[in-house]
Each structure stands twice: as structure tokens, then as C-alpha cells.
């Protein structure tokens, strides 16, 4: 993109005429108000006013999505919905992610002219690619570090989420990697708690992983949760690096984009981006921010892996939204700087969702993370890992799961139990 | 508080029995799931399980607040609402704000057993007060730096929000401080854009402010927006300090709590906390987070001023919510470490809301920020400032606005124009 304007796409709902409502958004978030103030010259407006680029009217509804909307006089009781594209001059805030956010998802959610407003997508000028590092490892780096080619990196989460001692965690990790898992992660509830101090846990777990790597030539990736204050995050990153670890994990929403960008500039490891808290930002269809817009912030900041949920997951999210998210991660932001993040497909996953996941995404460049779908396999964890690998073989060879299961017992047993 | 448990209060909506739903929340966000996994011993559960402390049933509704909720078999079509208190052992995450957030407002928003879930309030163990700095200046420090006692600090925002050159901003600030304003702030849309580089703008504005202070002995506070990447924020803080500035402003939601805490540990100036983006987190009554909970994060991280909107504001927020927010800022978190933030009352404010604001808050320890309500006063900005001061005199003396206006012409003229 060579333009010097930011394009922001919104879904809106309003009792007002759509053109008026869109102009309110543009005015509030740039230099204008409906009352001109001294200093608001024509030149200033020409250089700095946000512009309504497109309004696509959608359906009309009788009930507002959000309370306390300001209704116009002689309101007919209807609320119009539309998709609106607003453009902002880059000159208004420069290439700064937090200041971009103050513009495209700041006070405009407060506007009472709207009974619904959600940021759907962003197109950001090249200046953002120049200022921000983007992912350092992405798909290729993650494949290199895990020695996995031609299929997804297959992983699991350490459970119970909290409460295990470092020794118990280490025992569990040992079992998991001996079973052939490529990737293991801390739960997002587990970072540096008193009952499992970060350094102690990492040191114990990494000893087991390093031993395994020495024996087999393959090092499973352990995404160790370094979420914390900034100095602690950098220090823990350095401990992981020094100890031969190959990944750090961060709860993105709770540390903020500047912290992630700061970590990225310091980091020599892939950053595993956990999106917990995401539901708060997106679950209401007419409030907040959609994944496509949200993910671009973190990809520019430098996240290598990004959680996308999974098909037929245990949460509220419909499959279509999951696939849209994973595709977004794999869609280049800039031709010469794609900033691709490796999608993390997780939540109630087992071999059963693999064929559809591959069909929808058209590639296997992802982290496929299963809990019970691997560890509760009737023939043990190693069989669970194999069942998921076999499902990916079937998907990538265009064979049905049933046909492949006929000749692969681990997959067959998984289908019998989980299907 | 001496307990070692975190208390989190939620408003929930669910098609399931309330007790079941509350247990799902507690399980998902601590060590448990409904299926026990290996390692989930009784001892581990005793030490780490979250606990449902109280369920207060509210009304029942026919339509779910959020889509895609999982309805139980034989669902009667009703959605029950309740206030629920869940407690989490501090041992699960330790005194870490981002990890606290991963627990109390993380994946639980994704749970499909809920058609609504909002975090209302938090009670945090003393360990958080030990680890986090809290506000450095607060009310007393802000009063000292602005030389304002016995009434609110009265301020305005530089407008137009974006587009003014540093010279134009400086001219405007000169006019504003000569008119007697105590406090001036950048708009949240204006931090360090190409058309008004931070250093150039701050240098020019501070020259005018320092001249005024030399002449009058009173230095107006300029909350200069340093929102940006971390290194830039610290560097800009240092420029402000070196240049005799007395405040820095940050868009809290877009930089994250660890960045604010990092700045606070480095800072020698009050931190003005702007809450833009807040509507995204709270405008749906059954999703997100209420101010009372949200504000505690930023107060612990060290914010001195916190935006609360204002009575009869231009946004969607009802007055009751504004007052609850301002009261929250002024309610001690810990007996020996109250972490009070000075509420910033702003948005469509003029002398007219002062009596009610004082009546509801019972004190004048706040920043009262007016735009048009001061600068569009028919007799000029100085008269606008006086009209607001007079309204506070009336309020604090228990005189009605009308009576006070009868003997104070600036207030009378404001009432005539804006009333």
C-alpha cells in the first residue's frame, strides 16, 4: 500500500441517517466537530479531516444493540445497520500503534449517535511496516526450531492449568515429549506464581527437553509464559534463551502493544501470542473489534504465533469466525513485509476437525494444539499424537478420515472414542 | 485486606442453573475442569481451586444479551441473571496485574454457557499494594503543582484535536493560560504526529507556560500526550521534566498496564490517565468490565488522574455511571495505601453541572475540564473560567446557581448562554 491514509472499516448501527452518523465518527476522531472552533481553518480541515469513503447499507432492526443511544426527533423506531469505511490521514498520528488505536478505536465507541459500532478491518500505510518489526520467526522459523516440515506443528497445553509444582510440570512434560509432541505450552493462567516460580519451572522443564533433544536430535518447543511486568518479561526471555529454550508466550491483551513491540525488539525467540480476554472485545456483534483488525496490531508489534480458536471448539465462537481469523494471520499485510503469524488452532481439537481445517485453510502452516484429544486417547498419548498426524496425512492426501482410519489404528481408535 | 484470595464480582446471564454456571467460571479460570485430568489431586484442588462465594439472583429475560450461548437440553427459553462473587487464591498467579487479568478477565468471556458476563469489581490482596507503586502525586501533588486549593483544578483541552502546528498550539495555550486556566491537555488524538512533533510542540508550549509562571508565580499544568512506544514515552517524559513541565498524559487502554507501571517507576511527574477505548470494554451491560474493577488496575499501576466522563455528557453514559466511577477513584483500595486517583470530569461540561457534581461527590478533589463551556463563553475565555469557579463557590457554599448568578455576572452570562 502506498497511500498515506489509514482505512478503517466499521459495522455500525444508528437511529440517525447513515451519512450523518458516518460524518459524526469521522469528525469526532479527527479535527472536526459540527461546531467549528477557532483555528479550524479550511487548510487544516483539508489536511487532517477524516473522510467517509464508503457506506454500504445493511439490514434495519427494531431493537438497538447497545443501550443509551441518542435517538433523533421523529424517530421511526428503526435502527439502520451499515458497513462504513473511514479514512484518516497518517499525518494525524504518525506510525504509532497506540496512537493509531486512540484514533480508530478510541472515543468513538462512546458516541451516543450509535447503538452499535465495531471495527472490522484496517489497511495501514507502509510507514507502519517501516517502524514496526513484525514477526521475527513466523512459520519458517517455527518449523526450523521444531524440525517439523510438511504438516502442522502438533502440540498440547500443560494441565491442570495451575497448581502443579515445577517437578510435577517437568514430569508431565517428559511424558508429553516422549510421546512425540512437537510443542508444549503453559496455560495462560500460569506464568510466575509463588507455587511454580518461573525460573525454577523453566530450568527443570528445559533440562528434560534438552536431554530429549540431545538424544533424538529434535527439540520440542516449550512456549513458556513470561507475561508480567516489562523488566521481568525481558529477564525471563533471557533466561529462556540462555537455557536453550525456543519460545516465549505472552497474554497480549493484558500487556499491550508497546510492551509486545518492546519485547520483540529485544527478543531472539518466537513470541507465542495468547489472546485471552479476546471475547470481551468481540463477542457482541455491534461492539468492539474483529480479529482481522486486532491481529494486525500484534503482527506489526512482532508476534509469531496467534491464537485463533478451532473448529467445533468448546467456546462460543462459530466456525466461520475461526476460519476468518486463521486466514487473516496468513494474509500478507505488505507485499515485501507480509507479517504472517502462524495460526494457533486450539480448543476441543482432536483428529476429527483436521480435514475441515485443512479444507478451509488450504495449508498446514499452523500450530494444532489438542488437550484431551491427544492425552485422553484410549491407547495413550503417543497414539493420540499419531492419530492427529494421521488425520493430517489423510487431509493433505485428499483421503477421507474414514478411509485413512481403516488402515491406521491410532486414528481409528480416536474416531471410535471422540467421533 | 489481609486475605490471600482475590474477590471478583461478576454480572452473569445464562440459560443454565446459576450454580452450575458459576462453577464453570470458577473451574475454567483455575485448576479445574468438569473432567478431572491426571495430576488434579485433592490437594491441588484444595490449594488452587477458585471458589464461588456468593450468588445473588437477579431478573430473568427472554432474549440472550450475547449470541451463540450454549443452551441446555429442555431449555425453557429463559435466561437467568445474577451477581456472582468468585474468589481465586493469590497463589494461582501472584501479585501481577497482567496475570491477574488473564485470570479474572481472560478466557471466561469465551464460555458458551454464558449469554452475558461482565466483571464489576475486584478486591485485591495486600500483595498487589506491595508490588505496585500506586499514584505518585494524586490529589495533593496535583494541587501543589497547580497552586490550586479549596476548589477543583479547572482545565480545558487543546482543540481542534489534530492539525494545529506547534506554533498554533502555543498561541492557543498562551490565550488559555492568560485567561486563568489551571490545566490544559492535549487531545488524545495528538501525541507525536509528523505535523506537530512532540519535542517541538512541548518546547514551544513550555516556554509560554514557564514565562507565565515566572510572571505570576502560578504554573498551569500541561498534560502533554506522551502515548507511544516505551522508549519514546520514557524519553518524552524526561524532556517534559527537564523543560519544567508538570504532567504527562497516556492513553491507558492502548499501552497496557505493564507499560504504565514501567513509566510510573521511572516517572517524576503526575500521569494523566486517558481512558479512550473504554466504551468498547463497557458499553454492553453484559460484556466486558465495569469502571470500578478497571480503575483499580490503573491506580495500582500508578495513574494520578483518571477520566470519568461528566454529568449530562455528550456521550452515551448515564449520570449514575459517571458518579459511580468518580467515587471509585476516591475510594481507598487499602487503608495504608489508598491509591486514590483524581477524577477527571469532562465532556460537555460548563458551570451548569457543577452543583450536581459536588452534591454527588461531596468533595472538590477533581479536575473539571470544559471545552466550549469555557472557551465559548459570550464574554471570552477568562469570563468562562470565572463562571466555572463561581459555580464551584456556589456549590461549596450551598447556594443555588441562580442565587449566585444574580450577583456574579460571568456565571449569569454562562447560564443565559448554556443553560
Image (cartoon, coloured by chain):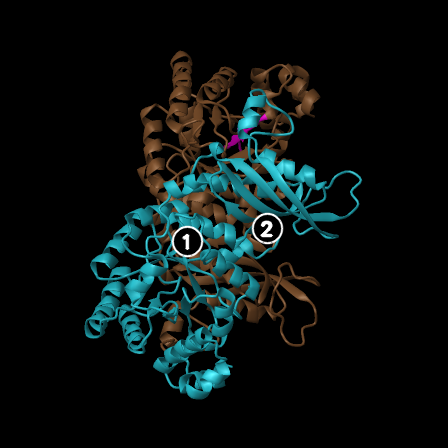
Chain colours: A cyan, B brown
At numbered mark 1, what does the secondary structure look like: helix, strand or loop? helix
Q: Mark 2 packing: few (<14 Cα in 10 Å), some, or many (20+)?
A: many
Residue A40 visible from this viewpoint? no
Disc 1 to disc 2, C-alpha distance: 20 Å
Position of residue A208 measured from the top left corner of the image (x, y, whole percent): 23, 71
Q: Residue under mark 2: which chain is it in?
A: A
Q: Residue at x 44, y 41 (%)?
A: A98
Task: State the predominant SS element of the stretch in magenta.
Answer: loop
B191 relative to A197, above or below:
above
- A278 to the left or right of A203: right
A228 relative to B317, above or below:
below
Position of residue B348 measured from the top left corner of the image (x, y, whole percent): 61, 31
Q: Residue at x 32, y 38 (%)?
A: B231
Q: Is residue A362 magenta?
A: no
- B415 to the left or right of B287: right
* N-terminal label among 1 and 2: 1
Q: Mark 1 packing: few (<14 Cα in 10 Å), some, or many (20+)?
A: many
Q: Which mark is residue A284?
A: none
Position of residue A93 measured from the top left corner of the image (x, y, whole percent): 46, 34
- B318 to the left or right of A238: right
B216 relative to B354, above or below:
above
Q: Quadrant of residue B262?
A: top left
Residue B317 visible from this viewpoint? yes
At numbered mark 2, what does the secondary structure look like: helix, strand or loop? strand
Q: Is residue B369 magenta?
A: yes
Q: Are marks 1 and 2 in contact (CB under 8 Å)?
A: no
Front residue of this view, candidates A169 and B228 = B228
Task: Point out the stretch of residues depicted in magenta.
Answer: B363-371
The residue that label 1 is drawn on is A252
Amino acid at each position: 500500500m502506498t497511500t498515506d491514509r489509514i482505512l478503517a472499516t466499521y459495522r455500525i448501527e444508528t437511529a440517525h441517517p447513515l451519512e450523518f452518523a458516518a460524518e459524526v465518527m469521522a469528525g469526532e476522531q479527527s479535527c472536526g466537530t459540527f461546531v467549528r472552533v477557532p483555528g479550524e481553518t479550511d487548510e487544516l480541515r483539508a489536511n487532517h479531516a477524516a473522510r467517509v469513503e464508503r457506506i454500504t447499507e445493511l439490514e434495519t432492526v427494531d431493537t438497538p444493540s447497545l443501550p443509551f443511544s441518542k435517538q433523533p426527533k421523529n424517530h421511526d423506531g428503526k435502527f439502520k445497520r451499515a458497513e462504513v469505511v473511514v479514512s484518516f490521514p497518517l499525518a494525524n498520528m504518525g506510525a504509532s500503534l497506540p496512537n493509531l488505536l486512540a484514533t480508530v478505536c478510541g472515543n468513538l465507541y462512546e458516541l451516543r449517535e450509535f447503538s452499535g459500532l465495531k471495527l472490522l478491518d484496517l489497511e495501514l500505510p507502509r510507514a507502519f511496516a517501516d517502524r514496526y518489526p513484525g514477526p521475527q520467526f513466523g512459520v519458517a522459523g517455527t518449523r526450523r526450531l521444531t524440525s517439523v516440515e510438511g504438516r502442522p506443528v502438533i502440540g498440547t497445553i500443560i494441565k491442570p492449568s495451575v497448581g502443579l509444582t515445577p517437578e510435577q510440570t517437568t514430569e508431565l512434560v517428559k511424558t508429553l515429549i516422549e510421546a512425540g509432541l512437537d510443542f508444549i505450552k503453559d496455560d495462560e493462567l500460569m506464568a510466575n506464581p509463588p507455587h511454580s516460580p518461573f525460573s525454577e519451572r523453566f530450568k527443570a522443564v528445559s533440562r528434560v527437553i534438552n536431554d530429549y533433544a540431545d538424544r533424538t536430535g529434535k527439540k520440542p518447543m516449550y512456549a513458556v509464559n513470561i507475561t508480567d511486568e516489562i523488566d521481568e518479561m525481558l529477564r525471563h526471555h533471557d533466561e529462556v534463551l540462555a537455557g536453550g529454550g525456543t519460545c516465549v508466550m505472552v497474554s497480549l491483551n493484558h500487556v499491550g502493544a508497546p510492551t509486545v513491540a518492546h519485547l520483540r525488539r529485544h527478543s531472539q525467540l518466537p513470541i507465542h501470542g495468547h489472546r485471552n480476554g479476546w471475547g470481551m472485545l468481540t463477542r457482541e456483534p455491534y461492539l468492539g473489534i474483529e480479529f482481522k483488525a486486532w491481529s494486525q496490531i500484534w503482527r506489526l508489534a512482532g508476534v509469531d504465533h496467534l491464537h485463533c480458536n478451532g473448529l467445533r471448539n468448546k467456546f462460543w465462537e462459530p466456525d466461520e469466525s475461526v476460519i476468518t481469523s486463521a486466514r487473516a494471520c496468513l494474509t500478507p499485510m505488505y507485499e515485501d513485509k507480509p507479517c504472517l503469524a502462524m495460526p494457533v488452532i486450539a480448543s476441543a481439537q482432536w483428529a476429527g476437525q483436521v480435514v475441515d481445517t485443512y479444507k478451509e485453510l488450504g495449508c498446514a502452516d499452523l500450530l494444532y494444539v489438542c488437550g484431551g484429544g491427544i492425552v485422553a486417547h484410549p491407547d495413550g498419548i503417543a497414539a493420540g499424537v499419531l492419530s492427529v498426524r494421521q488425520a493430517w496425512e489423510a487431509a493433505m492426501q485428499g483421503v477421507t478420515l474414514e478411509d485413512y482410519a481403516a488402515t491406521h489404528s491410532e486414528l481409528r481408535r480416536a474416531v471410535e472414542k471422540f467421533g
